[in-house]
Amino acid sequence: MPRDAFQDLLPSPRILLGPGPSMADPRVLRAMASPLLGQFDPEFTAVMDDVMELCRFAFQTANARAFPVPGTGRAGLEAAVASLVEPGERVVVGVSGRFGLLFCEIAERCGAEVVQVEAEWGRIIEPDVIARALARGQTKLVCMVHGETSTGVLQPLTEIARLTRAHDALLVVDAVVTLGGAEVATDAWGLDVVVAGTQKCLSCPSGLAPLTYNARAETALERRRRKVQSNYLDLGQLATYWSPDRFNHHTAPTAMVYGLREALYGVKVEGLKARFERHRLHGDALRAGISALGLTLFGAEPPAYRLPMITPVIVPEGVDELRVRQRLLQDFGIEIGAAFGPLQGKIWRIGTMGYSARRPNVLLCLAALEAVLRREGWCAAPGAGVEAALAYYAAAGDAALETADNLGAGGIGRY
């Protein structure tokens, strides 16, 4: 292509209400535009120290090891499994959606003997089926997805963690969608390794995978020192880089580390309880509006097992799933998500995560969805979705709305 064919890069503004990425917090984008520093500059290593401390806060842990892996959440998951599993070792994986299957693929590529423990997509993995799998043989890891974004299910973990420990195995948890949006009580729940991502409830661009692991996992890592097949994703080497030793492992993505620091600081300023309540508030308001439009939520589990920040909606019969998403994007600048595997073409996934979890976004999404569905022949009472959401907000009370609408500290802005 001739050079004069290029123009300035000006992406269209979007309201990102899919399963990720979410809209980036403005404070994160400002931080990422800061001057670059060398990776061993004292100012930058101080930022690294901040990131580790703030990771501990978000993961609710006192673990010595809490730092980001360079790469998306998938890189963090692969680093955890590849660094802990030797070929031939047994790995039990809970599968009730796309990202349980991803755990299986990663473990298989590491040469593990993978045992899938399955549940219907849209349901949780029951602890008793994990117990039966553990009883059948010595197991190195149990891998569980805390928030299955493909189905909107929130997996309870405390009993599975107890079972895992009783069988002298390690529990590795995918918390990519939940960190910063729902409780991830690493220490209280007894989780050994927890991996997250930046582009979901943390409202930072994708590119880093915060994780933490405890002393039990550290002992297993020590046994595998210099035996991990991947150099780049070797948690032992990465941990030494994110330590006072500053082992020269890779050149840190400085701007991304700035962004993660500000994203995590935003979590701390807002406070975990308030942040979790905000995600629940806006998700529930959206779901009230969806129901008022005559649409059906996917999944049979009770509300306690539903992700607060992901709303899966069944596509009505006779409605073109793809065309609805295209019209939302073209006419309203709103992005919602499609589905994977057996749910492809059958559900939409609407995300209210991080900076995207705001009242104006919920109301605009409902109004836009009503208008687009009407063109598809699906009719609801005019304004029913918006009215139901407004009623839900009113019932939540002034205190909840004030907390969710105006954080009022640290220049974070309005949610």
Image (spheres, grey):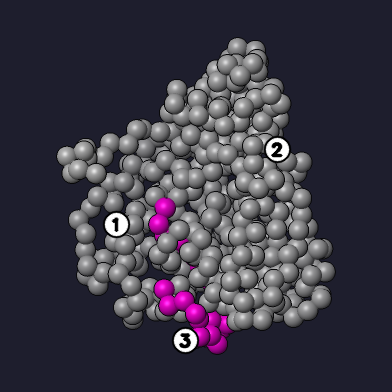
* 103 up-or-down from 389: above or below: below
Which residues, given as a range, are shown in magenta?
A: 206-232
- Does residue 214 belong to the magenta stretch? yes
Q: Residue at x 22, y 40 (%)?
A: 6
Seen as rendered, the residue at the extreme top is: 382
* 136 up-or-down from 261: above or below: below
Q: Residues within 10 Å of mark 1 (few under 14, many from 20)?
A: some
In primary-sequence order, the first of circles 2 and 1 is 1
Q: Is residue 31 left or right of residue 273?
A: left
Q: Secondary structure at mark 3?
A: loop
Q: Nearer the viewer, residue 329 or 300?
A: 329
Can you see residue 51?
yes
Q: Secondary structure at mark 2?
A: loop
Q: Are marks 3 and 2 in contact (CB under 8 Å)?
A: no
* 396 up-or-down from 356: above or below: above
Q: Is residue 95 left or right of residue 149?
A: right
Q: Residues within 10 Å of mark 2 (few under 14, many from 20)?
A: many
Can you see residue 291?
no
Seen as rendered, the residue at the extreme left is: 4
* 309 up-or-down from 119: above or below: above
CA gap, disc 3 and disc 1: 30 Å
Q: Read off the residue under disc 1.
A: 255
**Amino acid, disc 3:** Arg
- Does residue 334 belong to the magenta stretch? no
Q: Nearer the viewer, residue 382 or 44?
A: 382
Q: Which mark is drawn over residue 386?
A: none
Q: Which mark is drawn over residue 298?
A: 2
